[in-house]
Image (tube, grey):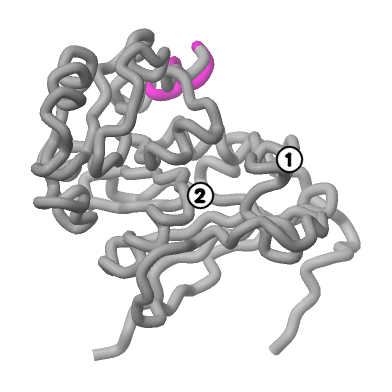
Amino acid sequence: MISRLWPADAPIELSDEELIAHYEQPDRNLPHLRVNFVTSADGAVTVEGESAGLSSGADKRVFKILRMLCDVLVVGAGTVRAEGYEDLRLDEKRVAWRRDHDLAEQPVMAVVSAALDLDPASPLFTRAPVRPLVFTSANAPSERRGALSEVAEIVDCGESTVDFATMRRELSERGLNQMLCEGGPHILGELTAADSLDELCLTLAPLLAGAGAGRITAGPASPVRSLRLAHAFHADGNLILRYVRAVTAG
């Protein structure tokens, strides 16, 4: 059956509370890894090298709610550099919501970098309200390891590359079960290959970016993973989609 999503006869504005209910997990103690991306209608992950050109007010609203709900935010070093990530710090309204729900006031920032190609003087580390985690490989340069260990906890998850199944297990063992990943494409590709992804939140922007930009995923080939559409919202031409891991029979 094909049913009509848009245009709707009577669009209904969703409150923050209703949006939270659509994204909150029923059991926060169960490990759950969610990825959030925005893409153009023709599949571009960036405009002029950044995702900001694809984002809208509605997308940013969901973006902030997902950050509020997570225990840990995972992002690749390349995305940290390209997007200019700074310290992960929620505003007072979202801190109050977390307090009311018996959560730590701020989520933890976790950066993935097999080579530890990160600046320890970055505000992401120096102004972080919670000591960040850095997931890396055992073969990462020792001098970078020493500098970064002053401002973050360094966690080895493989010999020369980061094993994402190990990373997910390390997070869960720290009680950081609600995991949100914001990319980049290579991280999504690795998570897909490792079958470590539970949910994909995807905003489809009403833009044609043209040739040149990559897709939201990159890296190693992997088996096809089936997803189920959990919800689809519309906002000013943007489709805000949520896919979850499909349950297989057997």
| Residue at disc 1, secondary structure | helix
* Tag of residue 36: 2
Expressed as whole percent of the image width and height from the top left, the position of residue 152 reads 21, 21
Q: Where's the C terminus, which quadrant?
A: bottom left
Disc 2 to disc 1, C-alpha distance = 16 Å
Disc 2, SS: strand
Q: For the magenta stretch, what is the residue range? A: 92-99
Tell me what residue is drawn at x 23 percent, y 55 percent: 164
**Front residue of this view, candidates 99 and 181:** 181
Along the polypeptide, which appears first: circle 2 or circle 1? 2
> How would you classify the magenta stretch by its main secondary structure?
helix
Q: Is residue 10 above or below residue 247?
A: above
Q: Residue at x 15, y 44 (%)?
A: 137
* Residue visible at 13% across and 20% down in the picture: 146
Quadrant where the N terminus sits is: bottom right
* Category of crowding for the residue at label 1, using alpha-carbon neighbours closer than 10 angstroms: few (below 14), some (14–19), many (at least 20): some
> In the rendered view, would you say 180 is above or below 87?
below
Quarter of the image where one finds residue 40: bottom right
Residue topped by disc 1: 53
Amino acid type, callout 1: Gly
Asked where in the image residue 204 lies, by quadrant, the reply is: bottom right
